[in-house]
Image: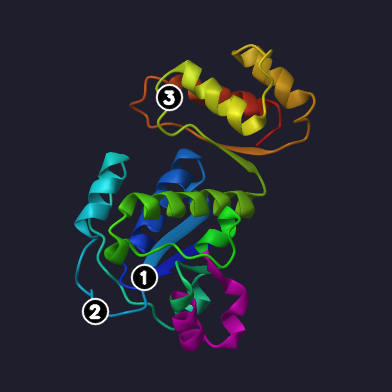
Amino acid sequence: MIKILFVCHGNICRSPMAEFYMKDLTARAGLADDFTIASAAVSSEELGNGVYPPVRALLDAQGIDCRGKTVRLLRAADCEDFDLLIGMDEWNLRAMRRLFGADAAEKLHLLLEYAGRPGEAVADPWYTRDFRAAWDDVTAGCRGLLEALTGTKLIDFAGCETREALYGVLRREMGWADWYGGNLDALWDVLTGLPHEGGRFTVALPREDSPAYDYAARIREVFREAGAV
């Protein structure tokens, strides 16, 4: 099991975004049992508070439930308890270095490292008021993190409502040639031939209430049968 702690200043905006999105992503990918995911604050000023309402509304709009989450403070034992401690900005990293000392260096990372943007921060929407930009950064970082930890390419069917949308995701993420048909036989041919022979993927299904859910599950089964997950 991989244990991840997301960290930001107050634990009401960015780190709970990351916590609950990553929990949702791993659950839709069938990997929930492989991860322990939490979040914490480096500051005590928001202790006792829940997720900031605009963030809660954003998560709700994605079908992600964060009820019951309250701010919890980063503690010294977290360095031992978690495999990765992921900050949103350099200030968060400095606070963790002061608390944990030099021995924790390999566990400490910025989230946007995993989106191919080393050294960049997820801007705090408490100040910017741009919650959508923070969401886009957090989700990009979490998807990259999952790929890094699993050693696979993520195929995420979130929001897909039709078969056409599912195949649109496949074509985009896999570089699937336009002349391949949009069907399971064509998918098998792609997975077992060039350019993806031997490639491995993580397939995250849409929500169970999506009209495309059952077909997406069949797609994931083809990945499994092809030895591509």
Q: Residue at x 62, y 74 (%)?
A: 106
Kindly state the secondary structure of the residue where label 2 is placed. loop
Residue underneath mark 1: 40
Q: Which mark is residue 45?
A: 2
Chain part drawn in magenta? 92-110
Q: Residue furthest front?
A: 128
In front: 20, or 1? 20
Kindly state the secondary structure of the residue where label 3 is placed. helix
Q: Amino acid at mark 1?
A: Ala
Kindly state the secondary structure of the residue where label 1 is placed. strand
Placement of 73 over or under 111, stated as above or below: below
Q: Amino acid at mark 2?
A: Glu
In whole angstroms, how far apart are the C-alphas of marks 2 and 3? 42 Å
Report whether residue 218 is seen. no
Label 1 close to label 2 by CB (< 8 Å)? no
N-terminal-most mark, 2 or 3: 2
Q: Quadrant of the N terminus?
A: bottom right
N-terminal-most mark, 1 or 2: 1
Q: Which mark is residue 213?
A: 3
Q: Residue at x 79, y 23 (%)?
A: 193
Q: Amino acid at mark 3?
A: Tyr
Report whether residue 174 is seen. yes
Q: Nearer the viewer, mark 2 or mark 3?
A: 2
In front: 186, or 52? 52
- Residue 192 in the image: state x and y as whole percent: 76, 24
Q: Which mark is residue 128?
A: none
